[in-house]
Image: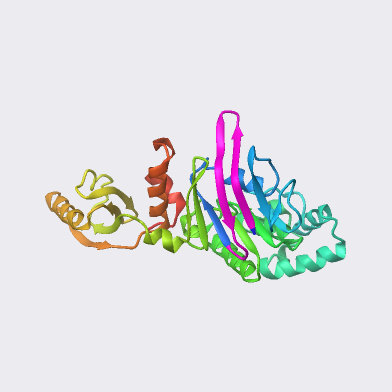
Amino acid sequence: MIRIEEITKTFGNNTALNSVNIHVREKEIFGLVGPDGAGKTTLIRIVCGLIRPDAGQVYIGGRQLTGQTSEQVGYMPQRFSLYGDLTVQENIDFFGSMYHLTRKTIKERSGEVFAITKLAPFVHRFADNLSGGMKQKLALTCALITRPRILVLDEPTYGVDPESRKDFWLILYRLNQEGRTILISTPYMDEAELCSQVAFMNSGRVAVVDSPLALKRSFPYHVLEVSAASREIGLFDHLSGVLEASLYGEKYHLLATDIDTARQAINERLSARSVAVTSVREVPPSMEDVFVSLAERDAPLTQVPGPERRQEYGEQR
């Protein structure tokens, strides 16, 4: 449905995209994930025909993209870009008129989308008076007014509360089940789990493309969860068999290269510090674990998110 071949884009001395290749299949939810500056937004804007690449080609539905995409692509930008001093309905009417839709067609189609987004009770409310989650639903409604076959969404739930993010993804799943292909970028690892395929981007390149399940199965380290009577940040620093340790809420999260060596070293450290331990158990890796591993492998140290930044990429453990 969307084929991206050898896309390269530079801005001055900065290479935003470097020979990117991605294939989004029909009726797929394809996620772009990566740190800030990875090139996700640049790639999405190229797919939507908003900027031109320096090299490479994009194909939409088998046809080469030569200008802006047609009505078969609905685009939702990263930031809310509709008019705050217009009501919900007025924004939809304005957006539909840009595609030369008649008032009757806009009314019929907005009614269809309202059934999915549940915006009908708010049609007379000014956009500036909507919550963050409702603003995103309005932006999605406008993107859907042309009945596009493909949805391209750039971090649509960034900064939105968890409940609204959940509602938004339920809408995306319904749209996908109705046959729409979705290309979405996200900074949240719990959202990456919901995609059928994920591309990890870093420094303008695609590090890997696979399903979330396959990526977690191929994770090269053991993950240990430790519950102990301590909240000391560096409790497990420089521990034999442990690659990395972080504190998440009331539990420690450790990446181990050798699980037996790590277990022994953990128990010895806790005993030496007279720290009572509740449990030490191996848990499955998360998409956040996969992402951090890929970022550390492929990125300069300045681009690897620290523990406080990593909390932003997924659910709290």
Q: Give x and y (percent) for residue 163.
A: 53, 62
Prevailing SS of the magenta stretch: strand
Quadrant the N terminus occupies = bottom right
Residue 88 sits in which quadrant?
bottom right
Q: Give x and y (percent) for residue 177.
A: 62, 71
Q: Give x and y (percent) for residue 287.
A: 42, 57
Residue sitting at 39 percent across and 37 percent down?
A: 301
Q: In terms of depth relative to the viewer, which is nearer, 122 or 62? A: 62
Figure coloring: rainbow
Residue 152 sits in which quadrant?
bottom right
The single residue placed furthest to the top in the displayed view is: 13
Q: In terms of depth relative to the viewer, which is nearer, 112 or 44? A: 44
Q: Is residue 1 visible?
A: yes
Q: Residue 54 in magenta?
A: no
Residue sitting at 68 percent across and 49 percent down?
A: 48
Q: How many marks?
A: 0
Q: In terms of depth relative to the viewer, which is nearer, 89 or 14? A: 14
Quadrant the C terminus occupies = bottom left
Q: Is residue 157 visible?
A: no
Magenta region: which residues? Answer: 2-28
Residue 173 sits in which quadrant?
bottom right
Q: Residue 20 in magenta?
A: yes
Q: Give x and y (percent) for residue 161.
A: 54, 57
Is residue 282 left or right of 180 when viewed as pictured?
A: left
